Image: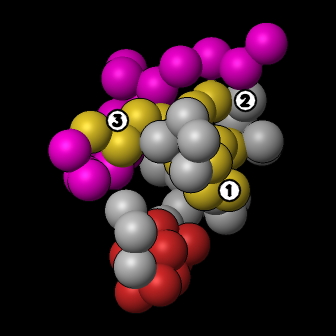
């Protein structure tokens, strides 16, 4: 994800678990839900918004 439009698209997504807003972590290529304590991966530029695929935060 490199363009400003891509960033805005990512910021429009919400957590499927809590419906809270997500924080885009460009370095880790993840969308982070602080509310659910989950990080959703972005693979090949596509956010994987499945709870089963999310990484639990420490």
Q: Nearer the viewer, residue 29 or 20?
A: 29
Q: Position of residue 22 (x, y in %)?
A: 64, 57
For the record, the magenta segment spans 44-58
Judging by the rendered image, the residue that carries numbered circle 3 is 50
Q: Which residue is mark 1?
A: 23
Along the viewing direction, whichever of 48 and 15 lies nearer the viewer: 48
| Residue 55 drawn above or below residue 12 | above
Q: Residue at x 60, y 56 (%)?
A: 24
Q: Position of residue 17 (x, y in %)?
A: 54, 42
Q: Which residue is mark 2?
A: 37
Q: Mark 3 and mark 1 in contact (Cβ < 8 Å)? A: no
Judged by depth in the image, the label closer to the viewer, 2 or 1, is 1
Residue 56 in view in this figure: yes
Element on which disc 3 rests: loop
- Colour approach in the figure: secondary structure
- For image coordinates 37% across by 20% down, the residue present is 52
- Distance between mark 2 and mark 3 Cα atoms: 14 Å
């Amino acid at each position: 994800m490199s363009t400003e439009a891509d960033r805005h698209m990512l910021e429009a997504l919400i957590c499927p678990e809590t419906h809270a807003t997500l924080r885009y972590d460009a370095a880790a290529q993840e969308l982070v839900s602080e509310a659910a304590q989950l990080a959703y991966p972005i693979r090949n530029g596509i956010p994987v918004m499945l709870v089963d695929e999310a990484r639990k935060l420490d």
